[in-house]
Image: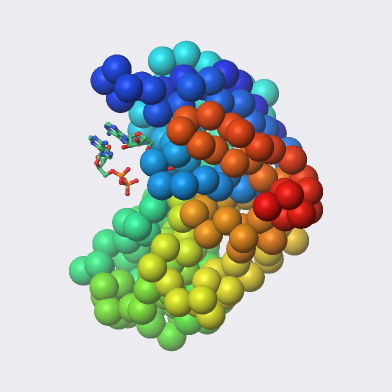
Amino acid sequence: MLVVEDLVVRYGRSPALRGVSFTVNEGEIVTIIGPNGAGKSTALKSIVGLVAPASGRIDFAGRSVVGLRTEALLRQGLSLVPEGRHIFTSLTVAENLRIGATARRDRRAARQDIADMLERFPALQRRVSSPAGKLSGGEQQQLAIARALIARPRMLMLDEPSLGLAPLIVEQIFDIIRELRAEGTTVLLVEQNAAKAVALADRAYVLQSGSVVIHGAASEILSST
Ligand code: ADP
Ligand code: ADP
């Protein structure tokens, strides 16, 4: 479904990705793990057009997505939950979801999408009129995921969803990711929390200093580390 081949990204002259290749098949959870600064975020940012690759190929569902803007990517079925959540803290939960729903032009359909999403995330339903900034970290992460899901992506990408969350809350977030896979959403998960991410994933890629150093079935990676 996603094919990234020989991707090179430079910030100025220093390479952040030195010819990285990976694939995500339909229905899989694939994780990219590796130390801070390895290039994990850069890989995701290249896919969603936040950084321009120097060279390489990024195809989603058989078509190049290099240079596409957010709206076009959403239409193709690609949605990102960015690192640090990036929700609007002074807007309410419902208002944050409405922003996610603007990809759909029809207002009634958008309202229905919001209602469906609130039903799916009871913690958000309970706080629907609260400013997002008043939610706990785990609730904010759920809101960021819900906002990305409202566009009904075929593939959801998550950048470090466990960052700053207590272990029990991380479990809740990972349970949500498991449910997504069960529903047929393909997932690309970038994580520093390698053990947890690999336990969840079908396949894993280990990035180090801008290169893929290990990749394989998650079970193999678990037994080799
Ligand atoms: P990770 O997500 O694995 O922590 P990043 O993709 O954020 O890694 O960063 C990869 C490398 O690129 C790091 O050395 C980082 O300092 C550098 N980098 C990231 N963003 C920029 C930027 N905007 N300008 C210059 N260097 C950057
Ligand atoms: P995030 O992934 O949450 O957006 P980053 O850590 O990647 O945050 O970067 C924060 C900001 O600093 C971004 O604008 C990024 O492009 C920039 N940045 C990151 N690393 C470097 C770096 N080594 N040199 C210059 N700018 C950087």
At 47% from the left and 64% from the top, the residue drawn is: 162
Left or right: where 11 falls relative to 65: left
How are the colours assigned in the image?
rainbow
Instruction: Identify which residue, 98 or 77, lies in the foreground.
Output: 77
Left or right: where 157 falls relative to 134: right
Residue 115 against residue 102 in the figure, above or below = below
Is residue 78 shown to the viewer in this render? Answer: yes
Instruction: Identify which residue, 105 or 187, lies in the foreground.
Output: 187
Q: Residue 107: horizontal and vertical position, in percent? A: 42, 56
Q: Residue 181: horizontal and vertical position, in percent? A: 70, 57
At 37% from the left and 73% from the top, the residue drawn is: 137
Is residue 121 shown to the viewer in this render? Answer: no
Q: Residue 21: horizontal and vertical position, in percent? A: 61, 26
Q: Residue 69: horizontal and vertical position, in percent? A: 40, 30
Residue 41 against residue 14 in the figure, above or below = below
At 48% from the left and 81% from the top, the residue drawn is: 123
Q: What is the residue that sits farthest to the front in this orientation? A: 225
At 53% from the left and 20% from the top, the residue drawn is: 19
